[in-house]
Amino acid sequence: MIEILQYGFMQRALIAGVMVAITCPLIGMFIVLKRLSMIGDTLSHASLAGIAAGMLWGFYPFWGALAFSILAAVLIEKLRKPFAGYEELSNSIILSTGIALAVVFIGLAKGYNADLMGYLFGSIAAVSKQDIYIMLFLSAVIIISVAILYHKLFYISFDSEGAQISGISVSFLNFYITLLASFTIVVSTRIVGIFMVSSLLVLPVATAMQMGKGFKKSLFISIIFALIAVVFGLFFSYYLDIASGGAIVLFSVLMLIIVLIIKTGKEA
């Protein structure tokens, strides 16, 4: 198994995978606690429109994914106010728009692009040095932001009204979590794929929460679960010649099932 690390593409895939395994649960924990799990799907489909636009007009697809996901994050927050009480509609509207734009852009390209499959389902061979640099920068922004705002993000996740009364800008932090989620989507796209990335935001967190260890320990455990899923998923992706995103998510699901079985057995 270790001999495959001599290949440059596998080294890049593992570096990217580690960043994905850290950032997804880090943001996913706050998303799950705020019951915003659907936001991953929304932002990922918006980023798909950006990738398709890049392929259509000939610019680096990562920039398109980043621009469209940031725009989607802004629009989601803007649409929350007119749909007060039905905030989930803002996600549905942006998700539908993202899918529609992606379909139109892909259709206008008039040709099958093999690289598109890597963005959709993840690919260990597709990660370039340029991808790594962008992922490192975005991952650093995510990690530093969570470290600085940790206590405030924790507060608004459990008691939004109390945080508002205490003087915390809840609306800004809600937007900033969405923005960080958009960065996380872009970081994860190459390895996990657009169709799978929302699963990695939620599954390791869901697995860790079943262990009932408290917030900080659950956050740490969710990152461990994500690292295990990513490393094993990447290796199996290489040896079985399958999409890395599917392999990673299946390992995440397997760990969740095992934890649920163990928990059920203890409670019986």
Image: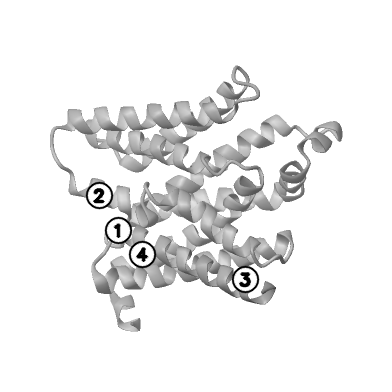
Circle 1 packing at 10 Å, graded few (<14), some (14-19), many (20+), is many
In the shown orientation, is residue 34 left or right of residue 48? Answer: right
Q: Quadrant of the C terminus?
A: bottom right
Residue 102 lies in what quarter of the image?
top left
Observer-side mark, 4 or 3, equals 3
Q: Quadrant of the N terminus?
A: bottom left
Residue holding disc 3? 264
Residue 85, horizontal then vertical, whole percent: 65, 24
Residue at screen point 60% across, 45% down: 31
For the residue labelled by badge 1, is the local secondary structure a helix, a strand or a loop?
loop
Q: Which amino acid does label 1 sit on?
A: Ser
> Pointers 1 and 3 in contact (CB under 8 A)?
no
Distance between the alpha carbons at the discs numbered 2 and 4: 15 Å
Which of pointers 1 and 3 lies earlier in the amino acid sequence?
A: 1
Observer-side mark, 1 or 3, equals 3
In the shown orientation, is residue 236 left or right of residue 93? Answer: left
Residue 112, horizontal then vertical, whole percent: 15, 42
> Pointers 1 and 4 in contact (CB under 8 A)?
no
Which of pointers 1 and 4 lies earlier in the amino acid sequence?
A: 1
Q: What residue type is labelled 4?
A: Ala
Observer-side mark, 2 or 3, equals 3
Residue holding disc 4? 247
Give the mark count.
4
Residue 162, horizontal then vertical, whole percent: 83, 37
Residue holding disc 1? 123
Q: What residue type is labelled 3?
A: Thr
Which of pointers 2 and 1 lies earlier in the amino acid sequence?
A: 2
Q: Residue 201 carries which label?
A: none
Circle 3 packing at 10 Å, graded few (<14), some (14-19), many (20+), is few
Distance between the alpha carbons at the discs numbered 2 and 1: 8 Å
Residue holding disc 2? 117
